[in-house]
Amino acid sequence: MLAPKKLKHRKHHRPQTKGQATTSNTIAFGSFGLKAITGGWIEARQIEAARRVMTRYTKRGGKIWIRIFPHRPITSKGTQVTMGGGKGVPEHYIAVVRPGMIMFEMDGITEQQAKEAMELAAYKLPVKAKFIAKK
């Protein structure tokens, strides 16, 4: 799974998912992309699940770029911990996705194969997404 090697701060504030994406909103590497329609948090496990389903569907053909990285830690406290005592320990890492952000890109396969693979990957993600092709 994806996780940062090193962090400037071990615990972060909760991120905002409001507003349109200003970066990563155009296809840069491949010919086809999966674009987020809604905003949200995507966990490292969900990114890995989407990557695996795309790779398996294309039978390891073509090239896949993952444009999002889970660098934001999300903390939680134990179930029977009393109030107070500070913030909990980092549980997992998330990538903050805003509407309009390109999450995955593909190249080296046909458009129909890429569309089907990306639709399967979109089922694994907690945000609504659509398939786009470079014009």
Image (tube, rainbow, N blue to C red):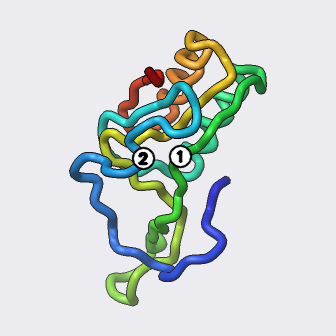
Q: Residue 32: horizontal and vertical position, in percent? A: 52, 25
Identified at 38% across, 82% down, the residue is 82
Identified at 40% across, 81% down, the residue is 87
Identified at 52% across, 72% down, the residue is 90
Q: Residue 18: horizontal and vertical position, in percent? A: 23, 52
Q: Which residue is mark 2?
A: 24
Callout 2 crowding tier (Cα within 10 Å): few <14, some 14–19, many ≥20: some
Q: Rounded to the nearest whole Å, what is the CA distance between mark 2 and mark 1?
A: 7 Å
Q: Is residue 75 left or right of residue 19?
A: right
Q: Which residue is mark 1?
A: 67
Total numbered badges shown on the rendered structure: 2
Asked if the residue at tag 1 contacts the one at tag 2, i.e. Cβ–Cβ closer than 8 Å, the answer is yes
Residue 100, located in which quarter of the rendered image?
A: top left
Residue furthest to the front: 135
Residue furthest to the right: 60
- Image quadrant where one finds the C terminus: top left
Identified at 53% across, 17% down, the residue is 115
Element type at mark 1:
loop
Q: Amino acid at mark 2?
A: Ser
- Does the rendering let one see residue 42? yes
Q: Is residue 119 left or right of residue 98?
A: right
Q: Is residue 22 left or right of residue 50?
A: left
Q: Amino acid at mark 1?
A: Arg
Q: Residue 111: horizontal and vertical position, in percent? A: 56, 13
Q: Residue 42: horizontal and vertical position, in percent? A: 46, 48
